[in-house]
Image: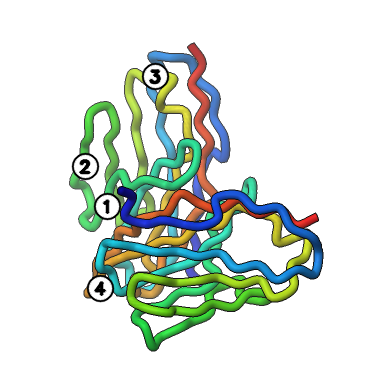
Amino acid sequence: EDKVVQSPLSLVVHEGDTVTLNCSYEVTNFRSLLWYKQEKKAPTFLFMLTSSGIEKKSGRLSSILDKKELSSILNITATQTGDSAIYLCAVPQGGSEKLVFGKGTKLTVNP
Amino acid sequence: DADVTQTPRNRITKTGKRIMLECSQTKGHDRMYWYRQDPGLGLRLIYYSFDVKDINKGEISDGYSVSRQAQAKFSLSLESAIPNQTALYFCATSGAGGIYEQFFGPGTRLTVL
């Protein structure tokens, strides 16, 4: 059964801290791994990773995939209160367009 | 205007009532999905449709049914709502041909008393 495990499940930090969120996966016919940010309602897309070792970056957020370790990390540097959200990791199931989601990491950034 | 819309945005109903949640999209996508989200459980797939004539069960389809009325419309029904169907429901869409990014609607918060 395909599955995605995220850790930690929740994290509380202070503004300015750097955080690392983890995602590990077990899936047949791996194609890609996706990260989403969910603030108040709908998840919004952050990154899609397909190749090991190639960092994707957007401002203070970056992510990298390690296919050997079947995992990915999402880094956020110089955190701000606006980074408070649930971060979701997902992989396509069996190579189809259906996504299997992890339970998410709830990040709280305090001023 | 939002690309993926859901109605209603909030609904409170009673046990045993029939409820329909509707989803419309203007992205021209073939693939549409219904998820529910419960605290601490992430997003779980209820049903999905890869085109108008294709409907498939997801991991938690019991107690739900769907209808794909057109490429742009995908409805989720609870035939006889029960309290453990209280959750946040999301519709999502994606393109075809190995395009994995899904675009989500704003969600419907459903409470079953």
Q: Position of residue B105 (x, y in %)?
A: 42, 54
Chain identifier of the residue bearing label 3 in the image = A
**Which mark sits nearer the N-terminus, 1 or 2?**
1
Observer able to see residue A37 = yes
| Amino acid on which the number 1 mark rests in the picture | Met
Instruction: Tell me the tag on residue A56.
Output: 2
The image quarter containing residue B28 is bottom left
Contact between labelled residues 2 and 1, with CB atoms less than 8 Å apart: yes
**Which mark sits nearer the N-terminus, 1 or 3?**
1
What residue does disc 1 label?
A48
> Mark 1 and mark 2: span between their CA atoms?
8 Å
Which structural element holds mark 4? loop
Q: Position of residue B73 (x, y in %)?
A: 40, 71
Q: Nearer the viewer, residue B105 or A61?
A: B105
Q: Closer to us: mark 3 or mark 4?
A: 4
Which structural element holds mark 3? loop
Contact between labelled residues 3 and 2, with CB atoms less than 8 Å apart: no
Q: Closer to us: mark 4 or mark 2?
A: 4
Instruction: Tell me the tag on residue B96.
Output: 4
